[in-house]
Image (cartoon, rainbow, N blue to C red):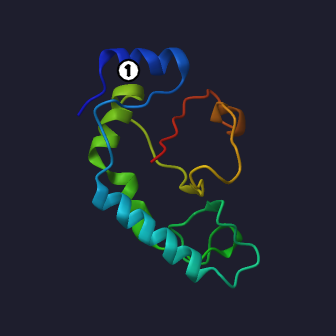
Amino acid sequence: MPLTDQEIDTYHRDGLVIPSQYRVPEVTLARINELYQNLLEANSDNPDFSADFILGPHLDASGTYGVKGDPEWLEFTRIEEILDMVEQLIGGDFILWGVTIFGKPAFSGKATPWHQDGDYYPIEPLETLTVWI
């Protein structure tokens, strides 16, 4: 389900878009939740582990903060419908350069005000896109 012309215009004008015609399948969301619970359990003895911010959940204890991860997290970066929408926005020549989990329970947890991620990335020219699931 591609983005509409209006959604593409919104992205280029505002720097973000919420696709109106696509939702991650429930089975995928359930697997994400299961893997997240596994991460919490596998890292319960790691004093550097934070459930709110997990860098490299696809790495196995060699990543940032020694997170004991699971390579299955990379499968969510290969969702064809999402990749097609990314291509609509920035073209087909792109790479994945990071996987991060932000634990954001509904109605609780750390508030994150509106911002553009470009302020945090040392990239010139700033041609990057962040996908949230």
Q: Is residue 113 left or right of residue 105?
A: right
Comparing 25 with 101, the one in front is 25
Residue 11 versus residue 40 in the image, above or below: above
At 69% across and 85% down in the image, what residue appears? 45
Q: Position of residue 90 (x, y in %)?
A: 42, 28
Q: Is residue 33 visible?
A: yes
Q: Is residue 79 left or right of residue 61?
A: left
Q: Position of residue 6 (x, y in %)?
A: 35, 15
Q: Is residue 89 left or right of residue 112?
A: left
- Amino acid type, callout 1: Glu
Q: Position of residue 42 (x, y in %)?
A: 57, 82
Q: Residues within 10 Å of mark 1 (few under 14, many from 20)?
A: some
Residue 3, image quadrant: top left
Q: Quadrant of the N terminus?
A: top left
At 58% across and 75% down in the image, what residue appears? 40
Identity of the residue furthest to the bottom in this view: 45
Identity of the residue furthest to the right in this view: 47
At 54% across and 70% down in the image, what residue appears? 59
Q: Secondary structure at mark 1?
A: helix
Comparing 97 with 5, the one in front is 5
Comparing 57 with 25, the one in front is 25
Callout count: 1
Identity of the residue furthest to the front in this view: 107
At 44% across and 65% down in the image, what residue appears? 33
To which residue does mark 1 refer? 7
Residue 131 versus residue 28 in the image, above or below: above
